[in-house]
Image: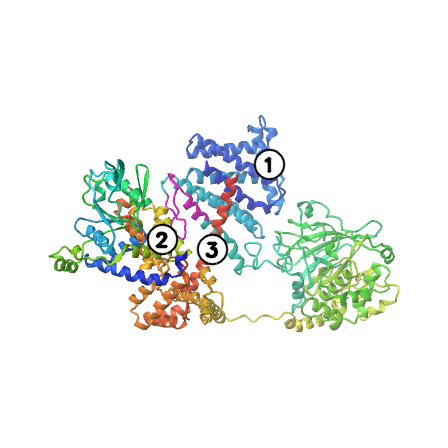
């Protein structure tokens, strides 16, 4: 019975590993029920002493009844007896569940009856397998295999690492099963061999017939230690992939947020890389019904950490799948604003790899794409955890708000902006001079819209900014540098800087990364790698997110950038300000199609080609031999650590020998310290370590006097060394045990003599080994390890005490 | 303790007196210095000694030599099955002249009592002696008579002839501070014995070298020997180890811990030290502890004697205050 319970607990612990696959807790209770059902069945068949095969059948039948009662109760007789109808219902549910699993990506809704049935049934069958293996066939170790199968499900489906706590729970469950099996097994032996480690002698066993406490204890020690090592060690090892096995430790931390289900390359780096490609590649082509180029947004960066903008993990609930109808409404867009509806057909190039986000004009209203694509409600990014956009053809309908400047000016900034606070958040150490700059530039602006315009104007006109891809870095200081002194940057700097300044004056802002509208080639708009772009989006209550364009356009800027209609300052004749880059000020539809690329694509390409090296310096690969050399050197240094520690300890003791008061380094007694004879303590500890290093270690039961006798006799000390040894032993003895130790002379000389006499008996190799790899340091490490194990023991007693009080 | 002040001075005295006694005894018993030293140790520790060995190795001789070398009353009791308790403690006899009961002290009223072949007496008689040993007093007809200090019982026991004997039960063996086995002498010592003692009985030539008062002073000095906490703890560790050893059915009693430390004091004093070191305990562990212990069935099966078990424990139990 104990084994059956342990098997059930272990199975359930392993089932907890499934948690990231589901939303909601229905699967949890279902699985718990299944495990309990199997436990009851196992208990019954154990009571009836059924053979193994019959026990398996009983468990299966009971599980069947449980599944019928939970999932097809209305078709069953008396709510739980399976009938033809209920079986058909279950089969139907299974089929739906199977389809749903094919269709959905994790996390799937846990209350979907088909998926719940599959999960519950699966956990139940695993429970039966574990129970049969552990409790019936007494092969508890083999029972780990079905549980491992359970654990591989989340590991293979999710890119996300297994949560370490879930792993610990599962491992503890399995350890518990093994311990229960061991106890059961040893319980039939008779008197157990005690393996409890104590300092003096073995603990007595009470006169029970089979006392397995000792074995259980060491089993648990091994189990705990193994689990602890399994969890902790990977955290310190450099992972082979950037995704570590558990969600903490080295790796896994990226700008895109760690532990993502989807792999998000750092959007900024990615964009920069595309911009600096030596030759332009086509990323996508599109057509739309009104033939207007539109910015295509891929990522929306919302978190400013002081260095750069990053992305929070997008959340794609199953109900926001693109094939489940229209997307959520764009945030903040109210009635009364004219919108332009457009339908865009986009085709992503086959060459694009690892693109898990769809480039879309903002705001998408509806997306028709093959695969499991989901929209993030807050940003309307569309992404997939399992499909890639490579070569994808899809259609998107957009409702682009076209507010007039008057409408925008009429907007009242709300007391409480209806967007998440993260769009306004700046780091606490945000430089005050940048905030001042933001206020200074927007002085006199009566509305947020005017302030935004002034900011944009600051970048495009009044600020004397220059577009240059060469700029490196994106830290706060780089941002300050860009805004206050160098004023040289490319779209990332412009976009980030404007977003940051907007946040500084209280306008919610974020940075969009994607592509500009591209160029018209033939009858399709073509977007290439050099159209990679980044722009700020500012939020206005009632209109929603509006893109702005602080980056200079044209030959001296981002070639295909364009300023939106509403963002063009109208009251003052600033149109001329954009005159050097007429393409940037004119809406695409006003331009002859295809003119922009014809303007100066070569020039940009040349610039980018020239700057390529400076922009992303390629790392010289370290030669293999050097790598091996470095590795060997590090290894050697590591190996020298014990020797170094030994030297430090020795020099500390030698100082103590010189009668300077310093704390004795190790286990020497409180009495010695209290008796303030640090020199004796140091001498004795040093002698102990010397002996240990030389392989003549003192027995724990050897008294100072006996030690002196042994050394003098076995190593045939001459009279001088023997006298020195006797003097050390007598002094230590006096200090340790006499009422009044009397005058204690310095022992340094004696110690040196003994040391020399001992060393003389050793071979040179042995002496060198003792110096380079002193075993006494390793002994200290070992005692530390024992301390850790003792800690486990204390955990053990804690638990015992609690159960005793219960 | 008031005695502690002049301990070093007394120690010198003690060492020289003890040396004299040892020499006196060793002039009679050849080549048994360990046994002689242990005997002295027990005397100074106010304990009692159990000498256990085959006949004719000098058990009685040792006891007598010790008694003779100290100028003190010595009584010898030959234990036989028909010995009565009153033969040990003494009887109240009716004095016709005074018309009163008069107490006739038994042989136990002496400083050194030699009980020969103690295992031949009935348990009742044995226990009468053992009561005196523990309490240092005799109660006859409701009157309590105190025994003089020093009071030491040296009992001999012959382990070979078991027929018609009553081996001392554990509880009574526990009263003896130490057990010593004489062992056969070395051939050289035996030869010398033949040469020297061939003609005259050796004991006749033995003159007392110390007085009772001197011995009492020595005992007092031994009481002042310092035992540090770690050493006390070590003694307890040793006792606890015997209690937990799987080779032993019965471990050492708290009384044995007490006697071990007492004996260690004497041992240290005999070495001229006024403090006890773990070596003293190690040297005494076997003679002081082994005779009180009962081997387990497994140990008996492996023919492991308690002496060996105690020896192993001494090698295993870490000495105090120094790291393992």
Callout 2: 10 Å neighbours few (<14), some, many (20+)? many
Tell me, yes or no, if residue A43 can be seen here.
yes
Give the residue drawn at x 20%, y 37%.
Answer: B82
Specify whether B36 is left or right of A765: left
Callout 3: 10 Å neighbours few (<14), some, many (20+)? few
Give the residue drawn at x 66%, y 45%.
Answer: A318
Residue A668 image position (x, y, % from top left): 44, 61
The extreme front residue here reads B97
Q: Which residue is mark 2?
A: B261
Cβ atoms under marks 3 and 1 closer than 8 Å = no
Compute the Cα span from label 3 to label 1: 55 Å
Q: Which residue is mark 1?
A: A93
Q: Nearer the viewer, residue A386 or A492?
A: A492
Element at label 1: helix
Q: Which residue is mark 3?
A: A787
Compute the Cα span from label 1 to label 2: 83 Å
- The first of marks 3 and 1 along the sequence is 1
A213 drawn magenta: yes
Q: Which residues are magenta?
A: A192-220
The subunit letter for the residue under badge 3 reads A
The extreme top residue here reads A78
């Amino acid at each position: 019975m104990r084994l059956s319970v342990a098997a059930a607990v272990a199975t359930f612990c392993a089932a907890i590993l499934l948690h990231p696959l589901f939303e909601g807790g229905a699967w949890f209770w279902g699985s718990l029920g299944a495990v309990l059902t199997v436990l009851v069945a196992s208990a019954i068949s154990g009571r009836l002493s059924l053979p193994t095969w019959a026990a398996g059948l009983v468990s299966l039948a009971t599980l069947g009844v449980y599944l019928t009662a939970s999932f097809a109760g209305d078709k069953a007789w008396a709510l739980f007896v399976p009938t033809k109808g209920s079986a058909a219902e279950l089969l139907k549910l299974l089929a739906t569940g199977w389809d749903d699993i094919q269709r959905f990506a994790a996390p799937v809704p846990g209350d979907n009856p088909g998926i719940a049935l599959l999960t519950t049934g699966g956990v139940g069958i695993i429970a039966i397998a574990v129970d049969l293996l552990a409790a019936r066939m007494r092969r508890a170790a083999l029972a780990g295999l079905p549980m491992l199968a359970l654990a591989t499900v989340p590991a293979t489906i999710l890119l996300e690492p297994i949560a370490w706590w879930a792993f610990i729970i599962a491992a503890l469950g399995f350890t518990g099963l093994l311990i229960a099996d061991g106890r059961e097994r040893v319980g039939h032996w008779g008197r157990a061999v005690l393996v409890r480690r104590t300092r003096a002698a073995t603990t007595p066993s009470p006169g029970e017939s089979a006392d397995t406490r000792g074995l259980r204890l060491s089993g648990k020690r091994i189990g705990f230690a193994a689990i602890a090592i399994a969890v902790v060690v990977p955290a310190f090892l450099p992972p082979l992939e950037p995704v570590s096995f558990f969600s903490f430790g080295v790796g896994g931390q990226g700008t895109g947020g760690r532990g993502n289900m989807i792999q998000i390359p750092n959007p900024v780096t990615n964009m920069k890389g595309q911009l600096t490609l030596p030759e332009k590649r086509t990323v996508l082509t599109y057509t739309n019904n009104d033939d207007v180029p539109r910015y295509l947004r891929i990522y929306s960066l919302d978190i400013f950490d002081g260095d750069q903008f990053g992305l929070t993990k997008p959340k794609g609930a199953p109900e926001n799948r693109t094939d489940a109808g229209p997307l959520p409404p764009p945030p903040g867009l109210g009635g009364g604003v004219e919108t332009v509806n457009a339908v865009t057909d986009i085709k992503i190039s086959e060459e694009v790899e690892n693109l898990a986000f769809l480039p879309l004009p903002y705001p998408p209203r509806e997306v028709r794409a093959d695969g499991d694509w989901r929209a993030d409600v807050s940003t309307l990014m569309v992404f997939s955890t399992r499909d890639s956009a490579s070569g994808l053809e899809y259609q998107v309908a957009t409702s682009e708000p076209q507010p007039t400047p008057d409408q925008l000016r009429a907007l009242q900034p709300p007391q409480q902006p209806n967007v998440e606070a993260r769009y306004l958040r700046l780091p606490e150490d945000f430089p005050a001079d940048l905030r001042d700059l933001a206020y200074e530039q927007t002085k006199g602006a009566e509305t947020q819209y005017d302030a935004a315009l002034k900011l944009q104007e600051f970048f495009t006109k009044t600020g004397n900014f220059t577009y240059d891809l060469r700029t490196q870095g994106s830290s706060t200081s780089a941002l300050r540098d860009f805004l206050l002194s160098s004023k040289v940057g490319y779209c990332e700097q412009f976009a980030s800087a404007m977003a940051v300044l907007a946040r500084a004056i209280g306008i919610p802002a974020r940075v969009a990364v994607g592509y500009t509208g591209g160029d018209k080639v033939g009858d399709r708009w073509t977007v290439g790698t050099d159209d990679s772009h980044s722009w700020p989006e500012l939020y206005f209550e009632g209109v929603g997110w509006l893109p702005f364009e602080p980056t200079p356009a044209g030959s001296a800027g981002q070639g295909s950038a364009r300023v939106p209609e509403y963002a063009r300052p109208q009251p003052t004749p600033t149109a001329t300000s954009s005159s050097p880059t007429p393409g940037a000020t004119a809406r695409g539809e006003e331009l002859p199609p295809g003119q922009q690329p014809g303007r100066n694509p070569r020039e940009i390409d040349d610039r980018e080609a020239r700057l390529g090296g400076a922009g992303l310096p390629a790392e010289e690969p370290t030669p293999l031999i050097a790598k091996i050399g470095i590795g060997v050197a590090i290894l050697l240094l590591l190996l020298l650590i014990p020797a170094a520690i030994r030297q430090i300890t020795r020099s500390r003791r030698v100082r103590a020998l010189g009668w300077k008061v310093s704390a004795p380094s190790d286990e020497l007694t409180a009495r010695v310290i209290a008796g303030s004879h640090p020199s004796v303590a140091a001498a004795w500890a040093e002698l102990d370590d010397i002996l240990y290093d030389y392989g003549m270690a003192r027995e724990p039961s050897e008294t100072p006097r006996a030690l002196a006798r042994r050394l003098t006799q076995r190593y045939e000390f001459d009279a001088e060394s023997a006298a020195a040894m006797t003097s050390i032993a007598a002094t230590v003895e006096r200090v340790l045990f006499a009422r009044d130790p009397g005058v204690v002379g310095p022992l340094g000389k004696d110690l040196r003599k003994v040391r020399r006499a001992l060393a003389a008996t050793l071979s040179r190799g042995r002496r060198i080994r003792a110096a380079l790899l002193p075993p006494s340091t390793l002994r200290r490490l070992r005692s530390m390890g024992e301390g850790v194990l003792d800690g486990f023991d204390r955990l053990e007693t804690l638990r015992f005490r609690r159960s005793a009080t219960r | 303790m008031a005695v502690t002040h002049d301990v070093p001075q007394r120690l010198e005295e003690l060492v020289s007196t003890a040396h004299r006694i040892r020499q006196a005894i060793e002039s009679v018993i050849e080549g048994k210095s360990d046994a002689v030293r242990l005997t002295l140790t027990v005397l100074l520790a106010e304990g009692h000694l159990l000498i256990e060995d085959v006949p004719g190795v000098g058990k009685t001789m040792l006891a007598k030599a010790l008694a003779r070398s100290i100028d003190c009353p010595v009584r010898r009791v030959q234990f036989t099955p028909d010995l009565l308790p009153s033969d040990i403690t003494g009887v109240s006899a009716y004095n016709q002249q005074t018309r009163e009961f008069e107490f006739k002290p038994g042989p136990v009223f002496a400083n050194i009592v030699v009980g020969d072949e103690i295992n031949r007496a009935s348990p009742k008689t044995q226990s009468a002696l053992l009561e005196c040993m523990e309490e240092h007093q005799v109660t006859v007809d409701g009157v309590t008579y105190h025994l003089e200090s020093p009071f030491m019982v040296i009992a001999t026991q012959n382990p070979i002839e078991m027929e018609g004997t009553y081996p001392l039960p554990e509880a009574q063996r526990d009263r003896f501070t130490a057990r010593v086995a004489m062992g056969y002498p070395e051939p050289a010592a035996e030869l010398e014995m033949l040469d020297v003692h061939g003609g005259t009985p050796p004991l006749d030539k033995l003159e007392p070298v110390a007085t009772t008062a001197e011995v009492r002073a020595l005992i007092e000095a031994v009481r002042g020997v310092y035992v540090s906490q770690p050493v006390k703890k070590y003694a307890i560790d040793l006792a606890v180890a015997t209690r937990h050893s799987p080779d032993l059915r019965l471990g050492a009693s708290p009384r044995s811990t007490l006697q071990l430390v007492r004996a260690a004091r004497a041992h240290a004093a005999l070495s001229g030290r006024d403090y006890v070191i773990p070596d003293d305990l190690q040297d005494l562990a076997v003679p002081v502890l082994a005779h009180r212990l009962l081997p387990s069935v497994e140990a008996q099966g492996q023919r492991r004697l308690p002496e060996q078990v105690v020896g192993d424990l001494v090698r295993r139990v870490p000495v105090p205050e120094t790291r393992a």
